[in-house]
Amino acid sequence: MPRMLDVSEDVRAEIGDEEADRLLAGENAPGSYDCTSCRTPGDSEQERTSTVLFVGEETAVLAFAHASCIPSQVVQVAEEQLRGAVRSITGESPVPPPAHAQAPMHGSAHGSVPGGAHAYPGQPAPAPAPAAESTANAPRSQAVLGVTSGLVLIEDELHPALVVEPTAPIARPGSFGGGDDFLPLLIEQGFLPVSAINEVPRSLPGWSVLLAMGQLHAVLQPGTGGGSPVAWWQAHQPLQVTEGWRSAANKSHTVLVFAAPVGSIGQQPREDLLRDALDKAAANGRLVAAAMPLAGT
């Protein structure tokens, strides 16, 4: 029976016209599935369903989601994460990796800081990793992007948020002066300075937050030359989020991303303390923010 599937041009280009036509005809697509975004049941015979192709270095997985949750798209992820997804995604359809699929960044599932300075992301308690040059006349140090999730109250409404803070100063590539260019680099990419957290920041085109199997996997930025999105930050291991955070994100389809230089936020054990630290960073001119759509699964 034909399926109510959305197959984007990017997905079709990766899997080929023949495979795409078989999916639309219902030959290789499941009727019922668990949406890989909201994790609730879906039925491709009864409702619009998106095809989402995850591409690693050696593996590709085709997953399904409510079209109302996320659009059909190609998402590049680390090979080790994709192999885990093959074992745990309900309703996936493994397919051979496309010969022309762009491979993700190499290394320990790392991302890059806008402007070309590289940093290697981790969990709120990150492990050491190769990093960006921090100051002039100093040896290279470890710089890790720590990411913490929490709910932020703005205009009497709770919003899902991510707070990004590196563990060392981030210098502009080629810079020989001291200082920290983390915020200027982000502002150049479209993040806006925040002096008070009293309104939702504006959306940043082309950027998105990838939630897969109910866990946080990456923050994506636009690919070069209009290509598929690539990871700006990617977790070494998927980051657990609370049920309340996930529900709020699935409801609004938007995540607020705040970023501050090293030493501005710190590791806060509670959301009220995290909010206090954000307010202080904003008042001190050490906070930028952007709203990003929830993408992937």
Image: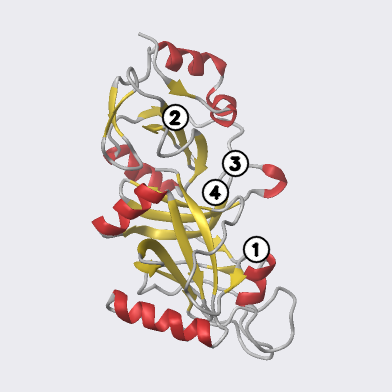
- 1 vs 3, front mark: 1
Check disc 1 and give the amino acid type: Gly
**Residue 265 appears anywhere in the view:** no
Q: Residues within 10 Å of mark 4 (few under 14, many from 20)?
A: some
Q: Which residue is mark 4?
A: 104
Circle on res. 102: 3
* Amino acid type of the residue that numbered disc 2 sits on in the rendered structure: Thr
Mark 2 crowd level (few <14, some 14–19, many ≥20, 10 Å Cα): many
Say which label, 2 or 1, has the lower sequence index.
2
Give the SS element for disc 3. Answer: loop
* Residue 216: image location, x then y, percent: 37, 55
What label does residue 190 carry, if any? 1
Which residue is at 42% across, 48% downward? 253
Residue under the point 30% across and 74% down:
271
Where is residue 125 drawn, in percent x and y?
A: 35, 74
Q: Mark 2: which secondary structure? A: strand
Reply above or below: 284 against 70: below
Depth check: 156 or 117 in front?
Answer: 156
Give yes or no for contact between labels 3 and 4 (Cβ–Cβ under 8 Å). Answer: yes
Q: Residue at x 59, y 57 (%)?
A: 204
Q: Is residue 222 above or below residue 157?
A: above
Q: What's the residue type where badge 4 is placed?
A: Pro
| Tags 1 and 3 touching, CB below 8 Å | no
Q: Position of residue 98 (x, y in %)?
A: 54, 30
Given the image, on which type of amino acid does mark 3 rest? Gln
Quarter in which the C terminus is drawn: top left
Which comes before the other along the chain, label 4 or label 1?
Answer: 4
Mark closest to the chain's N terminus, 2 or 4: 2
| Residue under label 2 | 51
Viewer can see residue 33 = yes
